[in-house]
Amino acid sequence: KVLTKVTTVSNTLNKNELSTIVNGVTGNVVDLTAAIKTAETVTAITPIVTGRTIATYTNETTNAPVEIQETITSIAPVAQITGIETRTIARYVNETTNAPVEIKETVTSLSYDGTAHSLDYIDEDGFENKIKMVDLIGDAETLTKLEVNTTTSTLDYTDEKVTTPHALDLTPLIKEPWFSTTTNTGATSNKEDIYTGGWVGIGYETKSDAPNEMLRVKGSITTVNSYFADYVFEDYFKGFSDIKAEYKFKSLSEVDAYIRKNKHLPGITPITKLEKTAEGYAFNLSELSIQLLEKTEELYLHVIEQDKQLDAKNNEIQELKANSKVMNERLEKLEKLILEKNNY
């Protein structure tokens, strides 16, 4: 039979002891306190520079607190160099003066000069350096051309190798609001006869409350006509008109007879000659405005004539009144004489 002896050495930290255990039985216990006391050294932390306290340490020798401090650093502004532009990028609070100190950097710039075709770099010392783009491109540059052809409605690209441009048809991309009366497709020229089927606003974005409105204009409309209604006065005073030879001024009796016969004013387009549409009658607005001005001028002339006639009649009436007064006075005198004679 073989016997095994197991010996264990352990340390008890709280008691500063070493003990042996043989086969589970505690043996000798060695107290290390005395040995440690004789060999122990006492350390202390002592501040070696003055500054700002960041912590305290209790000295084992004196059992008094010792301050642990740090040295104080400061950043002072450097005077700006004359002629050099600087820019503040940060601010630092000086621990000594407790005042803010600006931290600056020198300013450089890089810009493109379109006239000289160069990149202009200005360094920290204010010196300008030009980098010519032509020098960078050099012989590698090729000549191409891209332009819009308004006649063919194409985008023409001419490359370095061919003289005939590559034409890109832009017609599918163009959405014209006006259509050609000839092709019924989008108009492409400002000389084409055009039309549109919707409402048109010039200076307006919305319709007014007018029924069936198709055109709304903010501002004046200028039209051109071959003549103007001054032919009325020309014929009235001269007996003929160079402006409109076929025009003849009519008296009121002639106008009355014309209306009775034709059922419309002379010089005004009758309804029988107007175009009838689903929405109503179509007429020439420019022509109608001249016709209305013609009637206005005729009315003025007739009113002036009647005013002259009234003035003449008024003069006659005044003359008759004066004559009547004289006659009455003579009759009164005659009656008085007759009465006086009869009394004798």
Image (cartoon, helix red, strand yellow):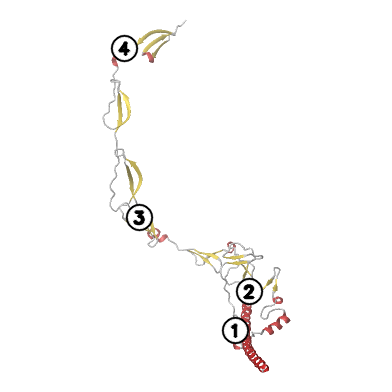
Q: Label 2 amino acid? A: Leu
Label whose residue precedes the other's in the sequence (3 or 2)? 3
Tell me if residue 233 comes above or below residue 69 in the rendering: below
Separation of residues labelled 2 and 4 (CA atoms): 131 Å
Whether residue 281 sits left or right of residue 230 in the image: it is right
Which dot, 3 or 2, sits closer to the camera?
Answer: 2
Q: Amino acid at mark 4?
A: Ala
Residue receiving disc 3: 121
Of callouts 2 and 4, which one flags the residue occurring earlier in the amino acid sequence? 4
Kind of residue at disc 1:
Phe
| Precedes in sequence: disc 1 or disc 2 | 1
Find residue 34 and name its label.
Answer: 4
* Quadrant that contains the C terminus: bottom right
Q: Residue 23's spot in the image, x, y percent? A: 44, 8
* Real-space Cα separation, disc 1 to disc 2, in angstroms: 23 Å
As measured in the structure, the alpha-carbon distance from the residue carrying label 3 to the one carrying label 1 is 79 Å
Left or right, 133 with reference to 79? right
| Cα distance between the residues tagged 3 and 2 | 68 Å
Instruction: Check the image and report above or below for 65 versus 13.
Output: below
